[in-house]
Image: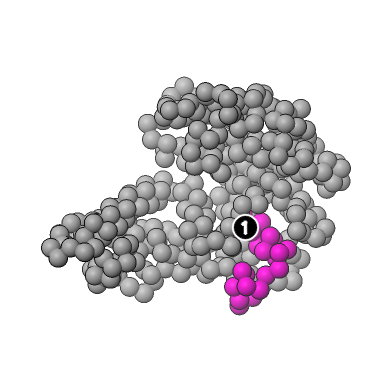
Amino acid sequence: MILRKLSILNYKNIREAELTFSDKINCFVGLNGQGKTNILDAIYMLSFTKSAFNIVDSQNITHDADMALVQGHYQLSTLNSQSSTLQVSCGLKRGVKKQFRLDKTDYKRLIDHIGLIPLVMVCPEDSELIAEGSDERRRFLNVVISQQDKTYIEHLTTYNALLKQRNALLKQYAEATDIPWDLFEVLEAQMTPLAEYIYQKRSEFIERFIPIFQSVYNEIAGGNEQVSLRYISQLQDRNLAEALVRTRQRDLILGWTSQGVHKDELEMLLGDYPLKRVGSQGQQKTYLLAMKLAQALYLSHSPILLLDDIFDKLDSERVERIVSLVQSDRFGQIFITDTDRQHLTQLLGNTDARIFHVEKGVIQ
């Protein structure tokens, strides 16, 4: 999948831009706060139907504008070596539902678009995978699996909706004496098979993903460190239907559901110890980069790769190995941001890259 052309109107600090890209490497250079990341975020939105950073769509519209538009023209190869094109556009307007369109047809459900344009983004905010709670690590699992399995994202969406209903019931009847247990039974009967599917797909993903991740990490780190991932789920040792019934009284006291795949965890290990506790800044950055690059290789359809300010806190040897890795045939089209044009030019060497300069939202 190749993004040939990107059109932006009133997206964050980018008033207007018409950009044509290289098939392999595209670089955005400029000082911090000029709009480099906003370009990557616009590309991200065309794959995931939402910003990577702002949940509220209206926050992505330029402050004094009423609407924003992001449009991408893509080229994809088919099995018979022929190529076809598609156009994806996202229109945002204050106070109006977002309009997302494939070619000339509006999506009835945004969820149907996920996975059509595989994409992996690496950015400084990825540090939350290590620093924050298990929500961030489950989100990583969900983003990867959803790009290959539409049933997974549909089951996950339905499960979360049912979970929200159960939690609402728990709060509503926390101090009641006459509790409608039949309502809980109905919700739990629907949640259980969905959770079992989600657990199975997460287990299968981690089993296949770990060797890819370890190989990428070793390539970046020079083979001097051992890393791994451990998937932890309550469903590994209990029947969820029975557990939900058994913990109803406790959940009423807590006010939330204590059993289910929404409590799953992904443990990050350096050697035999938690990465968060023993890893240096450079090792943590390498770990995160390896996870994201392994994600791109796992998706296997040459996903678009967005690399936002990835070189900070890494020694020169690791940076050179990363650049060499992403330039290889294993990866498809790449978009990189950096503040130092000279540094980036030295790293890329004679690579046929297209370089854009970004200043105050203007791209040249």
Residue displayed at 52% across by 23% down: 66
Give the answer, above or below, for where 19 lies relative to 248. above
Residue displayed at 24% across by 63% down: 174
**x, y (%) of residue 192?**
28, 60
Residue displayed at 53% across by 68% down: 267
* Residue 177 in sight here: yes
Disc 1 target residue: 127
Main secondary structure type of the part rendered in magenta: helix
The magenta stretch spans residue 133: no
Kindly identify the amino acid type of the residue bearing the numbered disc 1: Ser
- Is 197 left, or right, of 334 in this rendering? left
In the figure, residue 278 lies in which quadrant?
bottom right
Q: Nearer the viewer, residue 278 or 6?
A: 278
- Is 218 left, or right, of 161 in this rendering? right
Q: How is the image coloured?
A: one colour
**x, y (%) of residue 159?**
33, 53
In the figure, residue 261 lies in which quadrant?
bottom left
Range of magenta residues: 271-292
Q: Nearer the viewer, residue 135 or 114?
A: 135
